[in-house]
Amino acid sequence: MTLPGVTVFKREGTTTMAQPTGQTVPAACFLGIPLSLIDSKQLVDIAVEWGKQDRLRRVYNVNVHAMILAYRNRDFMRYLQEADLVFCDGYGIKLGAKALGVSIPQRMTPPDWIDDFAAAVAEAGQSVFALGDEDGVASLFQRTLASRHKGYLDAGSHNGFFDKTGPENDALIDRINSSGAVHLFVGFGMPLQERWIEANRHRLNVKVVYPVGALFRWYVGYEWRAPKWMTDHGLEWLARLMRHPVRHFRRYVLGNSLFLAKVFGARAGIGSIEPCPLDESRSPEEAAPPETMRASDEGRNGIAANHSSRAQ
């Protein structure tokens, strides 16, 4: 039984949330955001299938930090509501949904499924471009994946420090398009990475784009990650808070508290939650117009937000 704050629905096989088999995919409209109720294997299968199709798809993710950003930033909320797929990237989301009567199959942060993804796209012959982080990190990420997964196609990489508008941005988009990349990882940190995707998605020739935060540096070992027993039991946020209490106090102590208040307010029927958009018939061309990057949108920043954009 679901409670206020959650609507469970299905999107048919021809819609944006479709599995390769054409079966319907259950999703939950959780506090205004449409969460796909899938596991990591389904996510990878969908990504590979979408890589064969003729339109760009946006695969976004939410953790508690993303939910708080969405409550404070209408544009970011819209990005999540209009994405082709939104998966659960934090235990806080999984537990919050459970409190409202919805079972999310799996919390699946990118570091946990990237190897399965690399193996699948290698087998399918689909190439990947990595964009973000400091100079050299994305290229090392690509080389590491290629060394571990035979046939992995590295379409290129670039750091995240570039002007997000103007000639430099134009040249980078041309490079991504000319690379023939099927999949594009963007690692700037929330919400800059999603904002850049929205501003440029109508110009990109890739098939699937993913905002991935600090994935590159975590995968190559540049950034410390909590032990597996902590990440497997929803305690990664605690490990990060203990390691950097000042940096993460606002995000984890205040942010988690606000999220809990939202969840239990919804459970009690207090407060209004905007419904998820369920207009299945809208074509990509009918979607909202491209976002415009502003000079104040962190400019050349490609890494500062990375350290605050990971799972809870």
Image (spheres, rainbow, N blue to C red):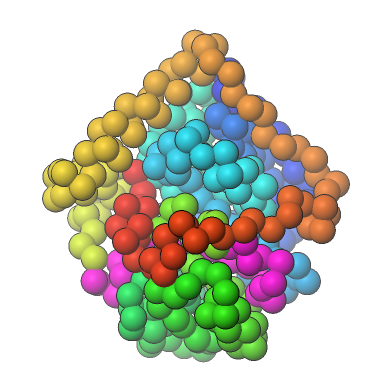
Q: How many marks?
A: 0
The correct choice, above or below, for 49 with respect to 124 in the image is above
- In the displayed structure image, the side of residue 108 where residue 102 appears, left or right: right
**Side (left or right) of 134 relative to 86:** left
Residue 46 location, x and y as percent?
64, 61
Q: Position of residue 54 (x, y in %)?
A: 78, 71
**Could you tell me which residue is drawn at 42 percent across and 60 percent down?**
298
Residue 67 visible within the image: no
The answer to which quarter of the image holds residue 142 is bottom left
Q: Position of residue 156 (x, y in %)?
A: 50, 86
The magenta region covers 197-222
Give the image location of residue 174, x and y in percent.
Answer: 63, 84
Question: 40 or 141: nearer the eye?
Answer: 141
Residue drawn 59% across the image and 24% down it: 273
| Residue 214 covered by magenta stretch | yes
In front of the other: 268 or 72: 72
Q: Nearer the viewer, residue 269 or 100?
A: 269
Residue drawn at point x = 43 percent, y = 86 percent: 146
The image quadrant where one finds the N terminus is top right
**Quadrant location, the C terminus:** top left
Q: Is residue 257 visible?
A: yes
Q: Is residue 310 magenta?
A: no
Question: Furthest-front residue in view?
Answer: 295
Tell me: residue 70, above or below residue 208. Answer: above
